[in-house]
Image (cartoon, helix red, strand yellow):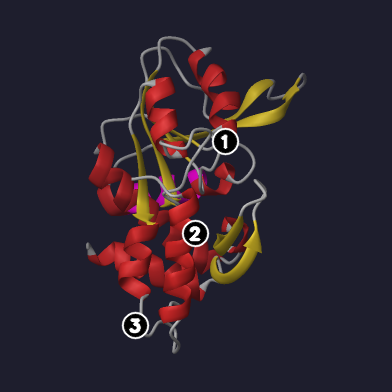
Amino acid sequence: MEQYKEEFIEFMVEANVLKFGEFTLKSGRKSPFFMNAGAYVTGSQLKRLGEYYAKAIHDNYGDDFDVLFGPAYKGIPLSVATTIAFYELYGKEIRYCSNRKEIKDHGDTGILLGSKIKDKERVVIIEDVTTSGKSIEETFPIIQAQGDVEIVGLMVSLNRMEQGKSKDKSALDEIREVYGFPTAAIVTMEEVVERLYNKECQGKIVIDDAMKKSIEEYYKQYGVQ
């Protein structure tokens, strides 16, 4: 596993973004782990988060793209932090863009926030985590409406590796199949377990034998191969 992935896993635990216990998800599933990207709130956290995203995007998609699109609302700070990090790490100017929930009819009008997306440009979409693909359903037509735009791929922070709308595909796999562009994550839950199982992180063991068993039972019911 790449060093930045191990660091990112520890960072999620340190920032209290990735938690282990008993959680009821929006889907109604009872999960032994929960991720809340809204817990990244400080300047130093957002700086590091942008760097991890930038490294993962560079590893998966290179730097031959023009715009980083972050769906509202959580995607807005993600896209801003990552464009800054991309410039600092790779010297490449990437523009950020997000959608508004409501179309603005005065001043800076339209549905887009930040940069406009021009015809023939290449776009990477950035999100925190994808469980149902609903935000892509909303934002895909917005991006496509800007002209002959190529979506290079989608990057999320954590691949939960569980069933999407169907039982045999994850949400990321479903997006790849429906929309025809690649999907990737900084880390997968498999990598999280590999790094944290019976290993100290932030002075404690967060995945012990009992938690690992709970995760395995969860994936027996909701996981995909």
Q: Which label belongs to residue 71?
A: 1
**Quarter holding residue 101:** top right
49 inside magenta stretch? no
Front-lying residue, 123 or 36: 36
Q: Which label belongs to residue 199?
A: 3
- Magenta: predominant secondary structure element? helix
Q: Closer to the camera: disc 1 or disc 3?
A: 3
**Quarter holding residue 68:** top left
Amino acid type indicated by mark 3 = Lys
Query: Residue placed at 65% from the left, 46% from the top?
Result: 27
Measured in 3D between alpha carbons, the distance from the residue under mark 1 to the one under mark 3, in whole angstroms, is 35 Å
**x, y percentage for residue 136?**
53, 29
**x, y percentage for residue 189?**
39, 58
Amino acid type indicated by mark 1 = Pro
What quarter of the picture does the C terminus occupy?
top left
Query: Residue placed at 44% from the left, 71% from the top?
Result: 213
**x, y percentage for residue 102?**
75, 26
Amino acid type indicated by mark 2 = Tyr
Measured in 3D between alpha carbons, the distance from the residue under mark 2 to the one under mark 3, in whole angstroms, is 21 Å
Placement of 169 over or under 39, stated as above or below: above
Q: Which residues are magenta?
A: 79-88
Measured in 3D between alpha carbons, the distance from the residue under mark 1 to the one under mark 2, in whole angstroms, is 29 Å
Which residue carries the number 2 mark? 218
Q: Earlier in the sequence, mark 1 or mark 2?
A: 1
Kindly state the secondary structure of the residue where label 1 is placed.
Answer: loop
What quarter of the picture does the N terminus occupy?
bottom left
* Mark 1 touches mark 2? (CB < 8 Å): no
Placement of 11 over or under 80, stated as above or below: below
Kindly state the secondary structure of the residue where label 2 is placed.
Answer: helix
Kindly state the secondary structure of the residue where label 3 is placed.
Answer: loop
Residue count near mark 2 (Cα–Cα under 10 Å), binned few <14, some 14–19, many ≥20: some
